[in-house]
DNA sequence: TCCCTTTCCGAGTTACATCA
DNA sequence: CTGATGTAACTCGGAAAGGG
């Protein structure tokens, strides 16, 4: 803030040099008479041709001015009247220019913040979607395994039916796995979770099915 | 308390400068 | 030359503060 600082006179000179380089045709009109203070720029009119007529064109702020403004913006985004005047004086700008710069800078800052926030939310959203897909795949896989297990049980039941007709004293009694006891082995009971203890199925748990 | 003026701000727009 | 982009400066409407 110190070594880079120029005096106000130097800065005005810089602006004038720029002006004389880029707009020599109007430079003469802007040079104040000796001892006359530079007046604030006139308000721009909407008419497109007006700039040409009035001779006032948009001027880019110098790198140094921008860097100083950025530095001040970094300290505090809001701009009190006193601070505005001080900055304007330090940079050789109209206080109105400083106010406008801060307004535009706040708008850019907000826009950037929104962009960042959007990117963050999008990343979170994508991660959640990915996890949802993974869980859905897992559900499908488990349902498939369950279906296979049901088929195996049905086959065993059918086989035991055949055995019981010839050997009623079989230790693997039909009643032991009577479908009615399991709710018919349908998905109804499983949709809401495994409500039966694994030992209710067959002695030894579900190991034989290969689920565990 | 109300009205008017001033100042500031955000949002949206315009106009100009610059660059690919 | 032209379209895209960045940005200084503008308009507009609303809020807040101060004074009569």
Image (spheres, coloured by chain):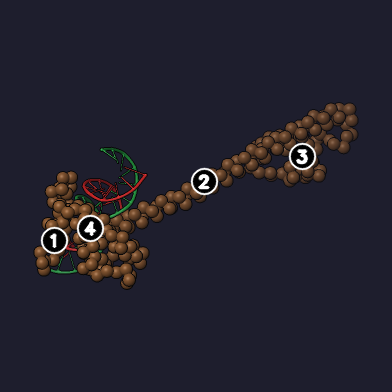
Chain colours: A brown, B red, C green
The crowding category of the residue bearing disc 4, from other C-alpha atoms within 10 Å (few below 14, some 14 to 19, many at least 20), is: some
- Looking at the image, is mark 3 or mark 1 nearer the viewer? 1
**Image location (x, y in percent) of residue A144:** 68, 36
Please tell me which of labels 3 and 4 falls first in the chain: 4
Residue holding disc 3: A209
Q: Given contact means CB atoms under 8 Å apart, are the residues at marks 1 and 2 in contact? A: no
Please tell me which of labels 3 and 1 falls first in the chain: 1
Q: Given contact means CB atoms under 8 Å apart, are the residues at marks 3 and 2 in contact? A: no
Residue holding disc 1: A31
**Vertically, is A146 above or below C19?**
above
SS at mark 4? helix
In the image, are marks 2 and 4 on the same chain?
Answer: yes
- Looking at the image, is mark 3 or mark 2 nearer the viewer? 2
The residue drawn where x is 60% and y is 43% is A134
Residue holding disc 4: A18
The residue drawn where x is 12% and y is 63% is A32
SS at mark 2? helix
Q: Mark 3 to mark 2: distance in Å?
A: 36 Å
The chain containing the residue under callout 2 comes to: A
Residue holding disc 2: A126
Q: Given contact means CB atoms under 8 Å apart, are the residues at marks 4 and 1 in contact? A: no
The chain containing the residue under callout 1 comes to: A
The crowding category of the residue bearing disc 2, from other C-alpha atoms within 10 Å (few below 14, some 14 to 19, many at least 20), is: few
**Image location (x, y in percent) of residue A167:** 89, 30
- Looking at the image, is mark 1 or mark 2 nearer the viewer? 1
Q: Mark 4 to mark 1: distance in Å?
A: 13 Å
The chain containing the residue under callout 4 comes to: A
Horizontal side of A127 relative to A189 (left or right) equals left
Q: Examine the rendering and report whether any part of residue A170 can be seen.
A: yes
């Amino acid at each position: 803030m110190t070594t880079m600082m120029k005096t106000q006179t130097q800065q005005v000179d810089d602006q004038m040099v720029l002006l004389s380089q880029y707009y020599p045709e109007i430079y003469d009109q802007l040079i104040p008479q000796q001892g006359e203070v530079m007046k604030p720029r006139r308000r721009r009119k909407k008419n497109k041709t007006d700039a040409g007529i009035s001779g006032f064109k948009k001027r880019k702020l110098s790198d140094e001015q921008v860097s100083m403004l950025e530095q001040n913006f970094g300290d505090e985004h809001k701009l009190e009247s006193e601070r505005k005047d001080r900055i304007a004086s330090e940079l050789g700008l109209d206080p109105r220019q400083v106010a406008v710069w801060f307004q535009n800078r706040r708008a850019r800052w907000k826009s950037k913040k929104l962009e960042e926030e959007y990117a963050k939310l999008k990343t979170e959203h994508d991660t959640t979607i990915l996890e949802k897909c993974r869980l859905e795949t897992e559900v499908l896989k488990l349902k498939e395994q369950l279906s296979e297990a049901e088929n195996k049980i049905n086959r065993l039941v059918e086989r035991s039916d055949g055995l019981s007709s010839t050997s009623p004293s079989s230790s693997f009694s039909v009643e032991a796995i009577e479908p009615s006891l399991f709710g018919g082995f349908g998905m109804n009971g499983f949709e809401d979770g495994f409500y039966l203890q694994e030992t209710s199925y067959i002695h030894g748990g579900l190991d034989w099915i290969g689920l565990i």
